[in-house]
């Protein structure tokens, strides 16, 4: 089976999925830009058995409009953006509706995204399936969390990621006497605001804005942490969350799409409920080393079982086989 993989980049988990699909199948990458070469796209699609598109957005709409010319099955993966910011524009709602009608199948990255997709576009109910994001499982942390906790959080530094609230939570807990360090990794428009907040709180010796973590240092950043917190107001199926689990970290997340796919209810708190997050961090801090070690082990094993990119890629490829005769 020859697959045309269409995306605007091959960064991070897109790259992992691309490489996972290439293990057993021939996969060709087509970079979809703002002004794509439609002729090249058509020729590339016709040389393949199926077209797979990341995001139920511009590329998916363009390719679905060309379906009568391409004459190939089209499978699209749906994340968070397509059902949040994109749907604030009426024209985008209409375009997404047409795309849903024309594509053969939509792969939702979490159960929450599936529910949201069907609530907006009921016509998607009989042509979608949930397959969670996958990651390359690498090294597991070798230490057990002690009474000093290294807390990490990662993502694009913008408001919906909830970094400011997390800084305030950790600062309050430090003031209560808890021995904590917080590292926030990423780049984005809130960089200076977050640094200024740390200075205002006089916590520059315990709360750090690490900036962007490159590929060479990515695993090491996770391996030096004990706890990972995802304090977002919305997600699809957060790759940073499952990456932290894949390194054996304890993870707490707000109740966004995908959280329940990854974590037990006791590690999830209502969006914006920072007091609840504080309670959960206090609870974990006071656990015995044996109890902390068991949580780390459970998370690592779940990531191996449910989020290994090799398994997830093959699940997706098996869906493709339904449409490739």
Image (cartoon, rainbow, N blue to C red):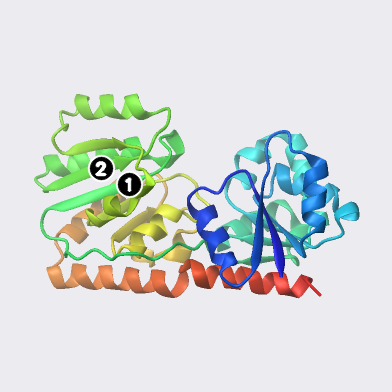
Above or below: residue 305 compared with residue 150: below
Q: Does residue 129 appear anywhere in the picture?
A: yes
User: Secondary structure beneath disc 2?
Assistant: strand
Q: Quadrant of the N terminus?
A: bottom right
Residue at (21% x, 60% y) in the render? 284
Q: Quadrant of the C terminus?
A: bottom right
Q: Position of residue 54 (x, y in %)?
A: 64, 52
Q: Which residue is mark 1?
A: 153
| Real-space Cα separation, disc 1 to disc 2, in angstroms | 6 Å
Q: Position of residue 150 (x, y in %)?
A: 19, 50
Q: Position of residue 174 (x, y in %)?
A: 14, 42
Question: Counting other residues with Cα less than 10 Å from the Cα at mark 2, is it few (<14), some (14-19), or many (20 or more)?
Answer: some
Residue ranking furthest to the right? 68
Residue at (27% x, 72% y) in the render? 297
Question: Counting other residues with Cα less than 10 Å from the Cα at mark 1, is it few (<14), some (14-19), or many (20 or more)?
Answer: many
Q: Is residue 17 left or right of residue 269?
A: right
Residue at (19% x, 40% y) in the render? 172
Nearest the eye: 254 or 238:
238
Query: Mark 1–mark 2 contact, CB under 8 Å?
Result: yes
Above or below: residue 181 compared with residue 1: above
Residue at (50% x, 70% y) in the render? 310
Dot 1 or dot 2: first in sequence order is 1
Q: Which residue is mark 2?
A: 183
């Amino acid at each position: 089976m020859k697959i045309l993989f269409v995306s605007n980049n091959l960064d991070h988990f897109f790259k992992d999925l691309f490489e996972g699909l290439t293990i057993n199948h021939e996969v060709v990458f087509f970079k979809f830009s703002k002004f794509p070469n439609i002729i090249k796209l058509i020729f590339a699609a016709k040389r393949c058995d199926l077209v797979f598109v990341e995001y139920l957005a511009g590329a998916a709409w363009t390719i679905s409009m060309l379906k009568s010319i391409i004459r190939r099955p089209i499978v699209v993966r749906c994340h968070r953006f397509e059902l949040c910011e994109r749907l604030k524009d009426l024209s985008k709602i209409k375009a997404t509706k047409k795309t849903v009608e024309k594509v053969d199948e939509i792969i939702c990255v979490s159960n929450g995204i599936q529910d949201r997709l069907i609530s907006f576009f009921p016509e998607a109910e009989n042509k979608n399936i949930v397959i969670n994001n996958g990651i390359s499982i690498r090294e597991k942390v070798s230490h057990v969390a002690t009474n000093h906790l290294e807390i990490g959080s990662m993502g694009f530094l913008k408001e919906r990621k909830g970094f400011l609230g997390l800084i305030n939570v950790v600062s309050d807990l430090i003031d209560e006497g808890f021995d904590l360090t917080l590292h926030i990794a990423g780049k984005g428009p809130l960089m200076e605001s977050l640094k200024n907040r740390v200075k205002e709180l006089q916590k520059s010796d315990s709360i750090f804005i690490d900036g962007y973590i490159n590929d060479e240092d990515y695993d090491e950043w996770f391996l030096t942490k004990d706890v990972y917190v995802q304090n977002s107001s919305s997600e699809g199926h957060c790759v940073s969350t499952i990456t932290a689990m894949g390194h054996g970290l304890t993870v707490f997340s707000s109740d966004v799409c995908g959280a329940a796919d990854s974590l037990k209810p006791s590690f999830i708190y209502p969006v914006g409920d920072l007091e609840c997050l504080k309670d959960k961090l206090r609870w974990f801090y006071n656990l015995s080393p044996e109890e902390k070690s068991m949580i780390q082990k459970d998370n690592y094993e779940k990531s191996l079982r449910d989020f290994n990119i090799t398994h997830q890629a093959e699940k997706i490829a098996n869906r493709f086989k339904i449409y490739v005769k």
